[in-house]
Image: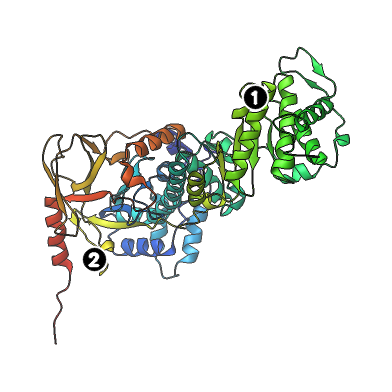
Amino acid sequence: MAAAGVVANGPKEEKQAVGIDGPTNPMVTPLLNDLYQFTMAYAYWKGGKHNERAVFDLYFRRNPFGGEYTVFAGLEECIRFIANFRFTEDEIAFVQASLPPSCEIGFYDYLRGIDCSDVEIHAISEGFVVFPKIPLMRVEGPVAVVQLLETPLVNLINYASLVATNAARHRFVAGKSKLLLEFGLRRAQGPDGGIGASKYCYMGGFDATSNVAAGKLFGIPLRGTHSHAFVSSFMSPDEITEKSLKSSDSSNICEDFVSLVQAWLSKLKWSQLLGGIFGETNQSELAAFASYALAFPKNFLALVDTYDVMRSGVPNFCAVALALNDLGYKALGIRLDSGDLAYQSCETRKFFQAIEKEFGVADFGRTNITASNDLNEETLDALNKQGHEIDAFGIGTHLVTCYAQPALGVVFKLVEINNQPRIKLSEDVSKVSIPCKKRCYRLYGKEGYPLVDIMTGENEPSPKVGERILCRHPFNESKRAYVVPKRVEELLKCFWPGRSGKEREELPPIKLIRERCINQLNLMRPDHMRRLNPTPYKVSVSAKLYDFIHFLWLNEAPVGELQ
């Protein structure tokens, strides 16, 4: 992955004038495309249609994971791509070699000259909660150019929104107080999947990642300690040659930290409250913990399930943590990575609390417990029902691979050309597009929750606070309701003005997008958010747009003839 600031395409002077860096991933170029976009672009050019003004909507048809909401993500990368969209000579040569030799040479001269200076992008702000049918992006410009943007834009939005939604769903089940750590890099679908997952899981409400590259690129907090390999690499405490450790205030030096650890282990073994819980612990594990504490006395967190959690791992951790405490350090906690996580966390908490009570170590009973081991929404929910003492969850495979649903199903549909509305029909009503250039609004009720999203024609008057508005289902005649909104929010904002002269919305840093996402999720009514049988959120059109959709539908649908 390229660092932000590396321009993938386009002349430097344009990039500097616009002030937007190229895509994070240098593979995001105009060639990140389906071949049929180039064949259509040639046919448009050949037929003299290439400069006709077209409007496309980018949206999705169904919320993922059986839920009733989606988090919109990926917009910044789309704007970076559009801001730097130019073909290089090498790319044009490859396109020429890939198309039939009958294609006229003038088409490749046309490709040399195109950019997105005449393209206009309106979009919902990144991090917003969004719903089916509502345009996430409205892309307007010369039809051939916009057609060449379709595949990259759909690609950049699809996974980003899917994994951000997955992260938000995990956050909802885990609860606001738990620390969520994204540990998915090694299981992600390649480097790009790993980088994207770290970025968009953080955006969706996770607190940190193990992915160092993502930390560098996006400023995401990093977390991580050691694996089972580190623990099993030790044979005995005799391997530790450098045993001295300065106190946290540097006022004195403990010359033999390992002996201090062993002294504490002996005290624990014969303590009144802990007697009989464990006997002889694994000494190689104790050596590993002591060695790690010597390396990171301020950041000691131990993986305690290499041999036996309660008979070895937890007692060994506590002996090291108490030795560190004598020197003014506070251990961070433990990680459980296998077995019955609910039971082990509860037993571990009792162990910590007994130490605090017997030895008077302040706050030791609240020492952090982290759990990992193929966690997903279902296991988090099960842990909540069982009762547990886990403070943080490390989640990987199911999160970053979106194991429960592999794709969002984003589509990109023509809704207007040369000011003429267009509609795509289907026997499957869910696949019928909503024609014309639209404006989209979110209407809020008296309790502050969003009630309904409504689409109107571009030139219709905006909904007003306190004004009774008829909201209609786009296709079902009987589904309609009046709404008197207490607040009205317009959703589509201009993120790329082209030549329109409109003011461009700034792209905020990822931390602000994350805050926006969390605030958006908090605004939603709880019944829309729940895991089981969530209430569908209403998406509607104005009465005028409803009438026009059905007029156009009847006008475009062929009339059958019975024989």
Task: In this rendered view, identify the residue nearer to me: 22 or 47.
Answer: 22
Secondary structure under tag 2 reads loop
Residue at point 36%, 45% (across, down): 529
Task: In this rendered view, identify the residue nearer to me: 18 or 335.
Answer: 335
Amino acid type at image mark 1: Lys
* Residue 144 x, y percent position in the rendering: 33, 56
Secondary structure under tag 1 reads helix
The residue labelled by disc 1 is: 357
Q: Is residue 481 above or below residue 359?
A: below
* Res. 210 in view: no
The residue labelled by disc 2 is: 425
* Residue 161 x, y percent position in the rendering: 42, 48
Nearest to N terminus: mark 2 or mark 1 = 1
Query: Which quadrant does the C terminus fall into?
Result: bottom left
Whole-angstrom CA distance, mark 2 to mark 1, is 71 Å
Task: In this rendered view, identify the residue nearer to me: 16 or 333.
Answer: 333
* Residue 548 x, y percent position in the rendering: 13, 56
Q: Quadrant of residue 62?
A: bottom left
Q: Nearer the viewer, mark 2 or mark 1?
A: 1
Residue at point 11%, 56% (across, down): 547
The mark found on residue 206 in the picture is none
Residue at the far bottom in the pictured view: 563
Amino acid type at image mark 2: Leu
